[in-house]
Amino acid sequence: MKKNDRQRLIVDMVMRHRKVDSDRLAVELDVSVDTIRRDLNELDEKGMLTKVHGGAVSSMQKLFQYNEVAVFNREEKKIIAEKAIPFLEDGMVAIISGGTTNLVFVSALPKSLKATIYTFSLEIALQLTDHPHIETVFIGGKIQKKSLVTSGIDCFQVLSKIHADICFVGTSGITLEEGITDEGYEIALIKKAMIDSSDKVVSLITSNKLNIRHNYSVCPLSEIYAIVTDLESDHQILKDYVARGGLIL
């Protein structure tokens, strides 16, 4: 395994578990403990984690900021981001859900963009602070520790009072029959609420999640204005979606 790939896996483990052990990393990645220590030192210097005795923990503020090392399938997500940017115009009010695809998207937004963006993702909100002309509104509530998004009645109440021009939904799975579905019940309900509060719905989805169905419904295809993927619009996988009449990019 190449060094960059190994370090990317280490960062992903820290993001998921908040803490990693050097000895365990050495076993799982089949390298020496000294190699792991050097990796942790380098990643600490880059701000991707905080090295502690025996391993590393997440540097929360810095991990919230977009960094290519922390995002898998980043090239595909960059393609999606570039395709999605034109949907968000000056003066718009938008709602953006969580997820690394959306994190790449907001990081790619032009610094000159003037818009108001609501989000229930702490990562997205912090990333948007780098954009001087975007008014960012973080929707509070109960924070889910793993995904760092809010949920609960407070979140629903805020969403119910918004009339957004557009929303960008990070998509865990989509099928022709079921539309967008999600792995989590609460997150599915929140995404439904953001869709109900928006004039247009844009689904951002990497191609590995096409034709994947999860347990909880978010919205049917008929409610989606555009599906943005990393594929060309004439790709074989997308033909049935195009035939349904939606905008496929």
Image (cartoon, rainbow, N blue to C red):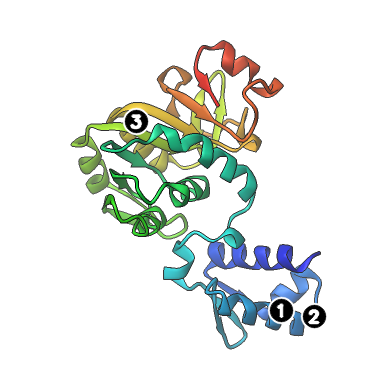
For the residues bearing labels 2 and 1, Cβ distance under 8 angstroms: yes
- Packing grade of label 3 (10 A; few <14, some 14-19, many >=20) is many
Residue toward you, 208 or 17: 208
Q: Which mark is residue 36?
A: 1
Kindly give the residue lying farthest to the left in the view shown.
Answer: 161
Which residue is pictured at 34% across the width and 35% down the height? 89
- Packing grade of label 1 (10 A; few <14, some 14-19, many >=20) is many
Provide residue 11's location: percent of width, then percent of height.
Answer: 60, 66
- Disc 3 target residue: 195
Mark 2 or 3, nearer chain start: 2
Q: Quadrant of the C terminus?
A: top right
Q: Quadrant of residue 156?
A: top left
Instruction: Using the numbered discs, state the Cα–Cα distance from disc 2 to disc 3 in whole angstroms.
Output: 49 Å
Provide residue 71's location: percent of width, then percent of height.
Answer: 59, 55
Q: Amino acid at mark 2?
A: Ser
Q: Is residue 239 above or below residue 99?
A: above
Determine whether the residue tagged by mark 3 lies in a helix, strand or loop: helix
For the residues bearing labels 1 and 3, Cβ distance under 8 angstroms: no
31 on left or right of 21? right
Q: Is residue 105 above or below residue 236?
A: below
Q: Amino acid at mark 1?
A: Ile
- Disc 2 target residue: 32
